[in-house]
Amino acid sequence: MSEDVHDTAGGQGVVARIDGLIAGPTAKAVVLGMMVFVLLLLMVPIVFTFVASFAESAAGALPSGFFTLDNWRTVLGLGDYGVQTSVGPGLAFSAMLATGGMVLNIIIGVPIAYALTRYNFFARDWINAIAILPLVPGIILGVAFLRTYPENAGSALGLIVGYALLKSPYMVLTVQSSFQSMDLQQLEESSRSLGASWPRTFLTVIVPNAKDGIIAGSIICWTLAAAEFNFTYMVYARGPRPFSLFLFENISNAPYLQSAAAISVYFLIVVAAITVLQLVGNRGFSTSSDR
Amino acid sequence: MSSQTHETETFTAVATALIRPETEQERERRRIVVMCLPFFVLATFAAFIPLVVMARMSVSADQFENSGFSMEAWYTLATESVYLTVAWNTLWFATLATVASVIFGVGISHALEKYEFPFKGFVVSMISFPIALPGIVVAFMIIVLLGRQGLLTHTVAFFTGGSPLDIAVATTVFGLFCGYVYSLIPRSTMVLRGTYTEVNTDAEEAARALGAGSLRTFYHVTLPEIRPGVVAAFILTFRSALAIFGTVLVLQSLNVATLRIDREIAVGFNSQIAGAIGLIYFAFILAFTFVSLRFTETDVVEI
């Protein structure tokens, strides 16, 4: 009885009253409408940018003069403006850095993800929080790197180490999600009872079973590192220019359609990444598997 | 004295057990340490040491290297009102964007979990797409929608007959808000989606059978069940919102902490002030995370 009184008093009474006015189909329409609105907000500029990168002129309300590859030629360094605007060297350099960061992430991420999933130990929750939440934002890490490693902050090594730290939570979470769906204790015990040592069990039984999670984590880490901007922007001083700085230069200085083409290069990379993620069971850039 | 000797002995015993374990329990402990070690080695060199050096930097007398001692940067931060404005801007803006993103996240996860419609997997992938986009690209997306040549700008100009130059809002605070929400909705949705799949549909059906409508069922049955997910989404989205930099750098409409740090470095290399802001920021995030994690279970926290 007292719950009924509570229900009609205060905020919850309002819920009950509005509830009477909303029929089931209305609620469905509101929620689906919300989703469609967000989907349009997110997708329209991406699709538009990609389409505009094939236009000749951006003078009118809508880009016009389809279809031309001029913007892409410029961005890919095949145009008349020479090599300095080309995406090639920066993308190759960033791909190398992202690969380095990804390898480091596999080395540090897989073991700690296993320890955190399989065992219960002192301060486990705290260590878990440190491993799965980004410790420092890129720009602050950049400032700290500038003073800590004055010679190396913006070097290839500095960038790889920075990327590995910044993206490590994605690897730990994705691999953890894979481990959580496995019966680790049983796998471990079966393997050991058949005579395998513990390191051998880990490397030849546990790790191969978490293959999909490791692949998904690697793809997410690689893609995010390949276009990492905040940290890169802060520590970069000289030498080959990473891809994200090329993007920044295009966004802030280049003609509209050329920026569109430069950004579209990255869109293609993301689409490729999402496609592979689907194949290993992750829907998009989510750290949890849908299987 | 004797307790210290005792502690030393315990420490030696623990260390010996780690290096040369004799029981299975000791072996398991060694495994845990070995497995966590690589991560902590990286965290030490890439985060802990740099953060300590940054703390030292904030009290350095010299702006180009850590030497001498001066509290001037901290004094400036405490006395100049611009820094209070920066802190206030950072907090209210991130909070507002987070609340909006979590509300949208709940709606989208609800739609994805409760209703049937075609291409669901594709929709999920598309909603997650912006997670991969760096802030500068998000800023460009906002320019595409709301800039002087923007799609929405031109649409509104077409219907109202106004000038696109007056209607463009990409470089206003509202445009920046859209940029924040653009990168945050996907993050909050992905966190909430995980919790939504675990909602007990029996209880919802029972509520409906007893005569509750959609809103009442949601408020009294679904919401309490997804509460841990909502808290987790709020924590993660708020942290992401505070860390946004690229979007602000391009759109430039609000002086938030990350932009201020960049300005301090870019104009005059005020490394001490940049270090001090960075340190406050880090301490705040750390405190916020550990206080707010008390309100939810750690396993629902995912990015």
Image (cartoon, rainbow, N blue to C red):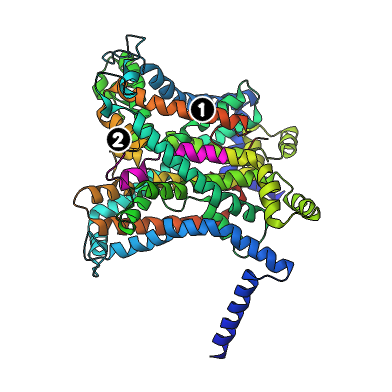
Q: Quadrant of residue A61?
A: top left
Compared with A142, B121 (above or below) is above
The structure residue drawn at horizontal position 52% and vertical position 56%, both measured from the top left corner, is B39
Task: Bin the neighbour count of mark 1 within 10 Å (Cα to Cα): few under 14, some 14-19, many 20 and up.
Answer: few
Does the residue at mark 2 contact the one at mark 1 (Cβ under 8 Å)? no
Q: Which mark is residue A272?
A: 1
Q: Gap between marks 2 and 1, in whole Å?
A: 29 Å
Q: Looking at this view, is B249 or A291 the one in front?
A: A291
Spot occupied by residue A217 in the image (x, y as percentages of width and height): 56, 41
Q: Is residue B27 visible in the rendered structure shown here?
A: yes
For discs 2 and 1, the disc positioned in front in the rendered view: 1
> On the picture, is B249 further left or further right than B297?
left
Amino acid type, mark 1: Ala
Numbered disc 2: secondary structure:
helix
Numbered disc 1: secondary structure:
helix
Q: Is residue B102 visible in the rendered structure shown here?
A: no
Disc 2: which residue: B251
Magenta stretch: dominant secondary structure: helix
Magenta residues span: A216-241
Residue A147 located within the stretch drawn in magenta: no
> On the picture, is A31 further left or further right than B70?
right
Amino acid type, mark 2: Leu
Q: Chain of mark 1?
A: A
Spot occupied by residue A60 in the image (x, y as percentages of width and height): 28, 13
